[in-house]
Image (spheres, rainbow, N blue to C red):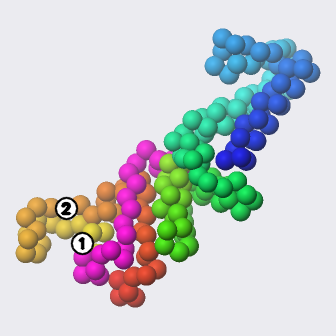
Amino acid sequence: MQRFGRLQQDVENCLRKLVAFGIARRAPGTPAQYEAARPGDSAAARLLDGFLAEQAVVNHEGRSPAVQRFREMIGSDEEMLIVFEWIRTAAKSDISALMLGPTGSGKEVVAKMIHELSRRGSGRFQAVNCTALPDTLLESELFGYEKCAFTGAHEQKPGRIELANNGTLFLDEIGDLSMVAQ
């Protein structure tokens, strides 16, 4: 989270310098809090617009639940900062991500952060502990089943894949499943 805080501070420092150089001026009543000092100067206005757009992104990210969760995570050494940056990068793309690590290392926490920062953050986050389910039940858990599909199926049940539609499906310990189940 230290790196995110630095980014926010860097943007604010740049805006202060634009004020000092006469390119921008403070405008407390406006949403951006700054405006062009010389509206006719298109180059200066474009420069200011770029910084204001970056400030809006940084401020929006700073208020998100995922960033608040970043602040709760322990660790500010270089390795953790790399993990935080990886999370932000993964959240910007719409691809599958594989997190490796021993049980209890925080893979689900990282998956939730990626989910919350991504465009799918408003959708559901579904976590399935694959090793907690026998191979015979894993298929029903992931894909669901229809009413009367088997003995005891008295009603239709959507699977986790369907429930995670437009959200995120986290398959915990998938590497520990039998080869048949995988």
Question: For the magenta stretch, what is the residue range?
Answer: 118-137
For this rendering, which residue is in front, 47 or 74? 74
Q: Residue at x 52, y 65 (%)?
A: 107
The crowding category of the residue bearing disc 2, from other C-alpha atoms within 10 Å (few below 14, some 14 to 19, many at least 20), is: some
For this rendering, which residue is in front, 66 or 119? 66
Q: Residue at x 33, y 74 (%)?
A: 132
On the question of residue 42 being in view, the answer is no
Name the amino acid type tagged 2. Lys
On the question of residue 144 being in view, the answer is yes
For this rendering, which residue is in front, 154 or 130? 130
C-beta proximity under 8 Å, tags 2 and 1: yes
| C-alpha distance separating marks 2 and 1 | 9 Å
Q: Position of residue 94 (x, y in %)?
A: 54, 57
Q: Position of residue 78 (x, y in %)?
A: 75, 59
Q: Is residue 119 rendered magenta in the image? A: yes
Number of numbered callouts drawn: 2
Mark 2 or 1, nearer chain start: 1
Image quarter of residue 128: bottom left
Q: Residue at x 37, y 58 (%)?
A: 126
Residue ID for mark 1: 140
Considering the numbered disc 2 on the image, is that residue within a helix, a strand or a loop? strand
Image quarter of residue 9: top right
Q: Is residue 6 rendered magenta in the image? A: no
For this orientation, the residue located farthest to the front is: 74
Name the amino acid type tagged 1. Ser
Q: Position of residue 163 (x, y in %)?
A: 31, 57
Q: Which mark is residue 157?
A: 2
